[in-house]
Amino acid sequence: MFEYIVSKYNYWVYIFLMMLGLYGMIGKKNLVKKLIGMNIFQVAIILFYISIGSKVGASIPILTAEDLHGSANPLHYMNPLPHVLMLTAIVVGIATTGVALGIIIMVYNRYKTLAEDEILEIRKKSGV
């Protein structure tokens, strides 16, 4: 049992990163720290999907001239779909981070703080 757990160490790393990111999003009160936690969580998910998309001993799915004349065995190639989808997820994550940073700047310009508790207190006092 111990050997099985140790052999899957990469999954433990992903779980640790996900929990670290979740703690950053839930436990921290600073908006920038929450955004960093969200990015750590996203990186953990991307690494997880990339790792499950690979096979031991498989090669990249590029067919050679020999494969075109014979029958190419799909078991000898990695599935490129998880990797392509994670490239899309990286682009979406960068865009989300940029928009979130823009919103954080606007929040700071309005409330002069990035602490969630202070922002909620200011909003409560102003009656908004």
Image (spheres, rainbow, N blue to C red):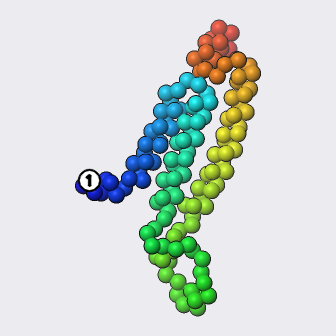
Residue in front for this viewpoint, 123 or 28: 28
Q: Position of residue 75 (x, y in %)?
A: 46, 76
Q: Relative to 102, is 125 on the left or the right?
A: left
Extreme residue in the bottom direction? 69
Q: How many marks?
A: 1
Describe the element under mark 1 as helix, strand or loop: helix
Residue 59: x and y, percent?
A: 52, 74
Residue under circle 1? 2
Q: Residue at x 47, y 43 (%)?
A: 17
Residue 20 at x, y = what percent? 47, 37
Q: Does 112 appear above or below 62? A: above
**In this picture, residue 69 sits left or right of residue 128:** left
Farthest top residue? Answer: 125
* Residue that appears at 55% across and 47% down: 43
Q: Amino acid at mark 1?
A: Phe
Residue drawn at x 64%, y 55% as measured from the top left:
88
The quadrant in which residue 36 appears is top right
**Residue 84: horizontal and vertical position, in percent?**
61, 61
Badge 1: how crowded within 10 Å, few (<14), some, or many (20+)? few
Q: Quadrant of the C terminus?
A: top right
| Along the line of sight, the residue nearer the viewer: 52 or 9 | 9
Q: What residue occupies the far left of the structure in this picture?
A: 1
